[in-house]
Image (cartoon, helix red, strand yellow):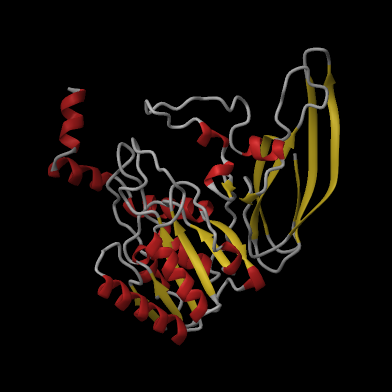
Amino acid sequence: VRVLSLMMLGTDVGRQAVRAIVDERAHHQLAYRAALSSCVLLKNEGNLLPLKPGTSIAVIGNFAAFPRCQGLGSNQVLPTKVDCAFDRFQDHTLKIHGVQGYTDSDNEALRHALLDEAIDAAKENAAAIVFLGIPDGIEMEGVDRDHMDLPEAQEILLDKILEANPNTVVVLTNGSPITMPWAKRVPCILEGWLGGQGVGSAIADIIFGHANPCGKLAQTFPVKLEDVPATKWAPDANRQVQYREAMNVGYRYFNSTDKAVLFPFGHGLTYTSFDYSDLVVTVVKDSEDEVQVDVSVVVCNIGDRPGAEIVQCYVYDVERSLYRPYHELQSFEKVYLEPNESKTIR
């Protein structure tokens, strides 16, 4: 009976029955809030973001109109609706010029025509919002990538847009870290990930300041692929991954070896500022078998916008008998604060 009931849910009748009892609007709002919390503002030179409502923008790249909100394979689901950033930008400004910008086609005439159109759009507007990322089919389960670069056509596009308009914001769509040889030239970079069905609204609201970004990186972005130690052993000739990193996985390796990175684990900017004070560390238990420490700190929003901060606590065993990485994330807590509001985090 359970199997037959599950099969029925996949039919038109079953889907209609589910829609009758599921609040799809509430679910979509939850997806929007998840996307909003997940977006990471990697860079914001000169406080270019947020843009003022009504700012004229060139929106460049297919991901703006056709978001890649999820991956391929066993994690793929059928969303009830998908917000696209291009549509949601219209909630904030009516001065929008949208262009494709690039193509993966080998048609040189088409590539040049799209590029010229994007350059003109960037020149004619106050800011250029360039959507870049990894297309479907390149990044998916069961397939190893042999590089961490964006497609060449996208990097050529970005180079030309930066020459045409210095007020350029890059919005990324990707499920894993990428290299960014252009990062120093771009004033603003917003990581949108594969943010689910509400990611288009989240991106538009962040760019125009309707929402304040608060996401932090859960991965390290290396400068180049060769900086990642696993590349020495994975994959080998037999398509096997040899696990040789021991405890130095991810940020633990980069922090322990003091390796330069593009963006570190735990990084993420916001439109306000937070002050940390009154750090108190208390040893509550100290025995041969165990040491327990209580840590508290006062966090204050010293900016002029409400926002959320993610307080992170890292530990290091200074009297270790076995090897431990230099930094290990022990605890974290997200706190929402109004301007001038303070809270003690423990």
Q: Residue furthest top?
A: 288
Q: On the picture, is 176 further left or further right than 99?
A: right
Residue 215 coordinates in the image, percent (x, y): 57, 52
Evaluate whether residue 94 shows in this view: no
Quarter of the figure with residue 88: bottom left
Quarter of the figure with residue 112: bottom left
Number of numbered tags placed on the structure image: 0
Evaluate whether residue 63 shows in this view: yes
Residue drawn where x is 42% and y is 72% of the image: 89
- Residue 233 versus residue 72 in the image, above or below: above
Residue drawn where x is 68% and y is 36% of the image: 331
- The quadrant of the image that shows the N terminus is top left
- Residue 235 versus residue 60 in the image, above or below: above
Residue drawn where x is 49% and y is 51% of the image: 178
Residue drawn where x is 37% and y is 46% of the image: 139
- The quadrant of the image that shows the C terminus is top right
Q: Nearer the viewer, residue 245 or 132?
A: 245
Residue 138 coordinates in the image, percent (x, y): 34, 48
Residue 311 coordinates in the image, percent (x, y): 69, 46
Q: Nearer the viewer, residue 296 or 87?
A: 87
Q: On the picture, is 141 further left or further right than 234?
A: left
Q: Residue furthest front?
A: 237
Residue 35 coordinates in the image, percent (x, y): 46, 53
Q: On the picture, is 180 further left or further right than 85?
A: right
